[in-house]
Image: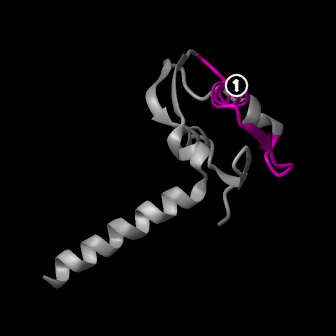
Amino acid sequence: MRVLANIGACVLFLTTAVSAQSPALVARQLTFKLTAATLAEATAVVAAQSGITIRFDASVPVELRDRRLSTVPLSFVNAPVATVLEYLTGQSGLAFVVVDSTTVVIQVKAR
């Protein structure tokens, strides 16, 4: 019984953490395909489709912004904005921070 209570508490915590990110990042779904896109190009597509502003922190080198993410096409179907951003930033060792419901900043991942 304790195990079930702990699992329930963990699920509740994770649901609260995701919801706290931002309704815009949780509720909006994206569908797109990119071929040989850079991080800057991919985030521009995310911003255009989701209606949010995505900025790069000064700590993110231009080389990372302009590096190709993949040689194979990237495809997302009905993916939440937060999931897409986690994937895109994770490919470059970066992270994103939700500033408010309409603004996200991409920065170097804290060590």
Residue closest to the far bottom: 2
Q: Can you say whether 72 is above or below 46 in the image?
A: above
Q: In the rendered view of the protein, which quadrant contains the N terminus? A: bottom left
Q: Is residue 29 visible?
A: yes
Q: Nearer the viewer, residue 50 or 64?
A: 50
Mark 1 Cα within 10 Å, few/some/many (few <14, many 20+)?
few
Q: Which residues are magenta?
A: 36-61
Report the residue at 59% width, 41% height from top.
85
Please state which amino acid type lies under the numbered disc 1. Ala
Report the residue at 81% width, 43% height from top.
61
The colouring scheme, among rainbow, by chain, secondary structure or one colour, is one colour
Q: Position of residue 30 (x, y in %)?
A: 52, 28
Residue closest to the far left: 1
Q: Position of residue 76 (x, y in %)?
A: 46, 26
Q: Nearer the viewer, residue 40 or 14?
A: 14
Q: Position of residue 10 (x, y in %)?
A: 34, 71
Q: Can you say whether 97 is above or below 72 in the image?
A: below
Which residue is under mark 1? 48
Q: In the displayed structure, does residue 9 sit left or right of residue 13?
A: left
Residue 58 belongs to magenta span: yes
Q: In the displayed structure, does residue 44 sit left or right of residue 29?
A: right
Residue 11: quarter of image? bottom left
Residue closest to the far right: 58
Residue 42: quarter of image? top right
Report the residue at 64% width, 29% height from top.
46
Q: In the rendered view of the protein, which quadrant contains the C terminus? A: bottom right
**Number of numbered tags placed on the structure image:** 1
Residue 40 belongs to magenta span: yes
Q: Secondary structure under badge 1?
A: helix
Report the residue at 18% width, 84% height from top.
2
Q: Is residue 90 visible?
A: no
